[in-house]
Amino acid sequence: MTDIERRKSAAPAPTSWDYAPAPESRDVVTLRERYGHYVGGEWLATPEEVDGAVRAAREAYANGWSELPGSERAKYLFRIARILQERSREFAVLESLNGGKPIKESRDVDLPLAAAHFFYYAGWADKLEYAFPNRRPKPVGVAGQIIPWNFPLLMLAWKIAPALACGNTVVLKPAETTPLSALLFCDIVRQAELPPGVVNIVTGDGRTGAALVTHEDVDKIAFTGSTEVGKAIQRELAGTSKKLTLELGGKAANVIFDDAALDQAVEGIINGIYFNQGHVCCAGSRLLVQESIYEQLIGKLKRRLATLRVGDPLDKNSDVGAINSKMQLERIEELVAAGKEEGAEIYQPPCKLPEKGYWFAPTVFTNVAQSYRIAQEEIFGPVLSVLTFRTPDEAVEKANNTMYGLSAGVWTEKGSRILWMAQRLHAGVVWANTYNRFDPASPFGGYRESGFGREGGRHGLEPYLEFE
Ligand code: NDP
């Protein structure tokens, strides 16, 4: 035995690793006492009506923006993308303060993807006639955009970047609980010297959103949020000429076959449901496991769950942050109580939740029947429902047994099975041997009650264009 080998065998095996607190500094952001609306390039001291914002957007549209050569519009979008990158630390900290998501996610996912969206659509701005050959694309006009609280800055980027690339102007309403990053974005709009009125941000609750939807001078509505509000908007716009895209809820199946690389699949399951506290429309909230690997997989999953660190969103070691609002926490608690009552078996790893704020421990439900509410309804929290299947046909049938159709995951070693499944799953996005992967070049959107229209990619330009 060599000296090194002897020392190695004498060393005690580490039993657990403790993480020292690693707080990100809050000093990089300044919060104001009060914010107004950002309309026509100005901060209004007294809150104006949505009408003022739409008028500002219309003026900017008519007075040059829509006529600007695509290459000029692209310059602004490239500028916005670069400034977002330059100020990404400030925005990441603010985004975690805004909604409670862990800093490592806002830093490594939300901010890079938001900037990537502006870069991507900047590239299309002067190539629209190549994107749609022989169709003479032109902008729609003023777009009203309503976004939710789960990815406040990223959803803003998904909405504003393609709209501006196509020559439209926008009025955007962030969610009531998470307006801060959208308001700081106005600073970037100014820094990039975007003409006043091209981007307008109005804050407020659902009533502000409703006023935007019904405003007669808005040409297009883009909405991301709950299926319930999406349906109300669709009813409201029926019979009008306004264009509409809806990106609504989901109850995605993440399907694990017995030939999958199980450790890799466990990482995908964790990322699929605990990313952003499960506040994700495409979250893999229904796990479908092939019966022959059920015990093994659940064992691995529970062991992995115990290593998740829940806590301070600004701590760089936190994996799971805070629940966005009291209302959302109550909704999660209500559905979890329903799951227990209906007979599912609950597992939560031992974890100490902070005393102040809204928190929910990562949760797995086994013994779930398809009829249970936790298998049917969108929980929008860190709660996974596990079901089993025996054959690929049964997996497809169970995966499609939902009113939604936004996303799905398939884990198998066989390429042919991935294609077979992807053809049969009713989902706008199917991830294979991965989950929650986003790229600005890839279209995203749903079927059925998950909505219609696509965001991202060349498809994402179409809702913001008319063709002669
Ligand atoms: P909402 O659909 O109410 O909110 C989404 C956006 O729409 C917000 O900006 C909201 O404003 C606005 N809004 C609300 N009512 C109207 C209206 N009548 N007309 C126009 N705009 C309106 O979602 P919630 O925040 O209430 O969340 C409820 C559930 O919806 C969640 O538990 C989750 O299941 C699902 N959800 C799905 C999302 C997705 O990405 N698909 C995102 C968010 C939620 P404000 O918030 O300021 O009132």
Image (cartoon, rainbow, N blue to C red):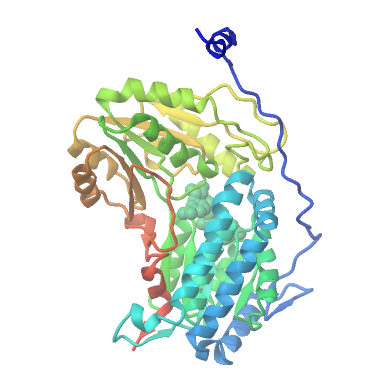
- When asked about the image quadrant of residue 365, the answer is top left
- Residue 61 to residue 225: above or below: below
Tell whether 262 sits left or right of 230: left
- Residue 365 to residue 406: above or below: above
Please name whichever residue, 435 or 51, is drawn nearer the observer in this view of the structure: 435
**Residue 130: percent from the left, percent from the top?**
34, 81
Residue depicted at 59% across the width and 60% down the height:
153
Q: Residue furthest front?
A: 2
Q: Report if residue 241 is visible in the image.
A: no
Residue depicted at 41% across the width and 24% down the height:
300
Residue depicted at 64% across the width and 25% down the height:
352
**Residue 391: percent from the left, percent from the top?**
19, 33
Please name whichever residue, 459 or 118, is drawn nearer the observer in this view of the structure: 118
Residue depicted at 69% across the width and 74% down the height:
191
**Residue 16: percent from the left, percent from the top?**
59, 19
Tell whether 298 sits left or right of 167: left
**Residue 190: percent from the left, percent from the top?**
69, 75
Please name whichever residue, 208 or 173, is drawn nearer the observer in this view of the structure: 173
